[in-house]
Image: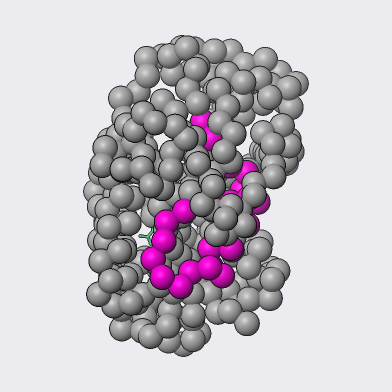
């Protein structure tokens, strides 16, 4: 039985991953600081579901090295899946310190703890944001990633470099996963698809960058979780994988599917493209297919159907 610590377990991906790992008979313990970046009630709702599955969550910050060390020792953890981070692109303009504290200082603190353990492997969340201003699509892990479009992407790129150094110096097996716009039930309220859903139902305008021709590779949560679990099994040296859907859609087409499931038309408000936003994301997943057997199956139609169903019940109770 694997013994896994999931950091950011009450976040969107952490919640689904923890639950899936537990269903596969692993021992799972979570850590989260329940920060107020978005509605904390949603984090507590996820925690409740995890508690019902006998998954305990430690309320702590990854910067607290003593607590992290104690969790690893006490539970004889063999794998850390590190998802705790300050996510979001726009917020990095408002509160850059949050990105420095969690994504840079917190990341190094975690590696500092891990280096003294033998045989703990690390799978961590990087992001498609590392591809930044790259023009060539689809984005391949062989491409250069030297032009992040914003601080968030830069911290994820830094994580990959720092992780490589720790792997090289202390032989920690590490896999970085570059997630591409993950969506689904219990998703993040700061993300566009969540805000669009809310606004369409409330008959409020939704803000569309430019002409809506942005391309996004939306990855359904169950597919992202499958890829992450394969990466845990695979992790034995240093590697980087794309976890994307490999079928990018135009924002306007995405909105049409959402309108269909909601049974309502969106009111569009076109605004200038936000500087720092990537105009397209598109994952090359050949390597992930070959080495992780990663084959995302969920179409936008199906994924958004599940999301809308969840959103309506969530909205009723909140
Ligand atoms: N969702 C996506 O589309 C996406 C895409 C690319 C990368 N990622 C990355 O995947 C990871 C998970 O993303 P998510 O969408 O679940 O985000 P999320 O914000 O829902 O989850 C992150 C969780 O980590 C916790 N956290 C943040 N800083 C912490 C700290 N210092 N100590 C302890 N806990 C802390 C938060 O409270 C939150 O519950 C993040 O690293 C994110 O950058 C997500």
Residue depicted at 53% across the width and 74% down the height: 4
Q: Which residue: 54% across, 13% down?
A: 268
Task: From this view, report whether residue 263 is shown above or below residue 300.
Answer: above
Task: From the viewer's side, name the closer residue of 8 and 256.
Answer: 256
Give me the residue at 51% from left, 31% from top. 216
Residue 54: % across, % down: 66, 74
**Observer-nearest residue: 300 or 103?**
300
Residue 221 painted magenta: yes
Q: In the picture shown, does residue 147 fall above or below 45?
A: above
- Would residue 315 appear left or right of 114 to someone viewing this image? right
Vertical position of residue 43 compared to residue 183: above or below: below
What x and y, as percent, mark residue 113? 31, 77
**From the viewer's perspective, is 251 left or right of 86?**
right
Magenta stretch, residue numbers: 216-241
The quarter of the picture where the C terminus appears is: top right
**For residue 169: magenta?**
no
Point 53% across, 63% down: residue:
231
Q: Quadrant of residue 226?
A: bottom right
Whether residue 279 is visible, yes or no, is: yes
Residue 162, position as x, y percentages in the image: 26, 61
Give the image location of residue 105, x and y in percent.
25, 61
- Closest to the observer, 65 or 252: 252
Q: How is the image coloured?
A: one colour
Left or right relative to 23: residue 104? left
Q: Quadrant location of the N terminus?
A: bottom right
Observer able to see residue 39 = no
* On screen, residue 57 above or below 293: below
Kindly indicate the quadrant of the structure image that contains residue 115: bottom left
Count of numbered tags: 0
């Amino acid at each position: 039985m694997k013994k896994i610590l999931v950091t950011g377990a009450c976040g969107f991906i952490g919640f689904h991953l923890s639950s899936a790992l537990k269903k596969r008979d692993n021992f799972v313990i979570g850590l989260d600081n329940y920060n107020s970046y978005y509605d904390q009630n949603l984090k507590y709702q996820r925690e409740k579901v995890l508690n019902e599955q006998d998954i305990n969550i430690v309320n702590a910050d990854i910067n607290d090295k003593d607590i992290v060390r104690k969790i690893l020792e006490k539970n004889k953890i063999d794998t850390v899946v590190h998802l705790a981070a300050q996510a979001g692109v726009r917020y990095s303009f408002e509160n850059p310190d949050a990105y420095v504290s969690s994504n840079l200082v917190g990341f190094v603190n975690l590696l500092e703890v891990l280096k003294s353990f033998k045989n703990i492997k690390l799978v961590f969340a990087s992001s498609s944001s590392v591809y930044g201003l790259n023009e060539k699509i689809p984005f391949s892990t062989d491409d250069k990633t030297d032009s992040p479009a914003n601080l968030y992407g830069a911290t994820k790129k830094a994580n990959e470099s720092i992780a490589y150094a720790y792997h090289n110096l202390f032989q920690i097996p590490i896999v970085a996963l570059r997630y591409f716009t993950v969506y689904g039930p219990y998703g993040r309220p700061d993300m566009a698809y969540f805000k669009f859903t809310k606004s369409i139902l409330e008959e409020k305008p939704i803000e569309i960058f430019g002409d809506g021709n942005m391309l996004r590779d939306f990855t359904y949560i169950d597919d992202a979780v499958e890829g992450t679990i394969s990466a845990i099994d695979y992790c034995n040296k240093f590697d980087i994988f794309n976890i994307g859907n490999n079928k990018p859609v135009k924002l306007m087409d995405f909105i049409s599917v959402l309108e269909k499931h909601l049974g309502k038309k969106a009111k569009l408000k076109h605004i200038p493209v936000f500087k720092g936003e990537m105009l397209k994301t598109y994952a090359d997943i050949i390597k992930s297919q070959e080495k992780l057997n990663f084959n995302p199956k969920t179409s936008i139609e199906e994924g958004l159907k599940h999301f809308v169903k969840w959103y309506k019940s969530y909205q009723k109770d909140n």
